[in-house]
Image: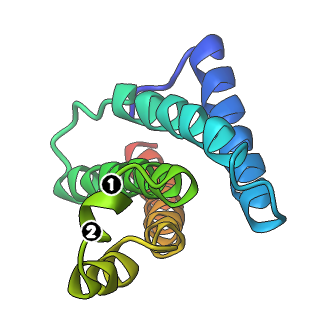
Amino acid sequence: MKQLNRTQSAMMLIGACLMVAGAALYVFGEQTVAPCIFTPGTLMFAAMQYMQKYTGTDVTMRRLRRIMLTGAAFFIISALLMVENAYHVVFPLFAKTINGYTSYVKYIHNNWVVTLLVAAVLQLYSTHRISSELQKNKQREA
């Protein structure tokens, strides 16, 4: 894996901290401020993950990188759903009928938590496995 430079690593860390702060703020009652913190953090974190490249030929590492990038995409979806949940941008399109309102509640309302959980599980798995694969490859080379 291509290592990030110091600035990129700092941006990734700041993005991760902003994501945690935004999610915590949303849970503890600041629903209008939280997306303004969570979304930029998500974009910084995901951008830095997309900048990490793997140029090797190991199929396992390529698969793990794709899983990691899928997790980053789920983080972005979580941010979009959080913004919708806080500001109700597309809610008027659904709320014209009872069936539309039911669909809104089923597919959008508070589902940012589900996508955030999926993203976190994918990130934890891929991060752990990538580090163990890198160690295994380093031991093979030595």
User: How many numbered circles does the render carry?
Assistant: 2
Mark 1 touches mark 2? (CB < 8 Å): yes
Q: Amino acid at mark 1?
A: Val
Q: Give the left or right position of residue 63, taking residue 79 as reference.
A: left
Q: Which residue is mark 1?
A: 90
Q: Is residue 76 above or below residue 114?
A: above
The way the protein has been coloured in the rendering is rainbow
Q: Residue furthest right?
A: 28
Query: At 47% from the left edge and 28% from the top edge, which residue is drawn?
Result: 48
Numbered disc 1: secondary structure: loop
Q: Residues within 10 Å of mark 1 (few under 14, many from 20)?
A: few
Numbered disc 2: secondary structure: helix
- In percent of width and height, residue 13 lies at 69, 34
In the picture, the disc for residue 94 is 2
Q: Residue furthest front?
A: 96
Q: Give the left or right position of residue 11, taking residue 132 as reference.
A: right
Name the foreground residue: 123 vs 34.
Answer: 34
Q: Is residue 136 visible?
A: no
Q: Amino acid at mark 2?
A: Phe
- In percent of width and height, residue 38 lies at 62, 43
Quadrant of the snapshot with the N terminus: top left
Q: Residues within 10 Å of mark 2 (few under 14, many from 20)?
A: some
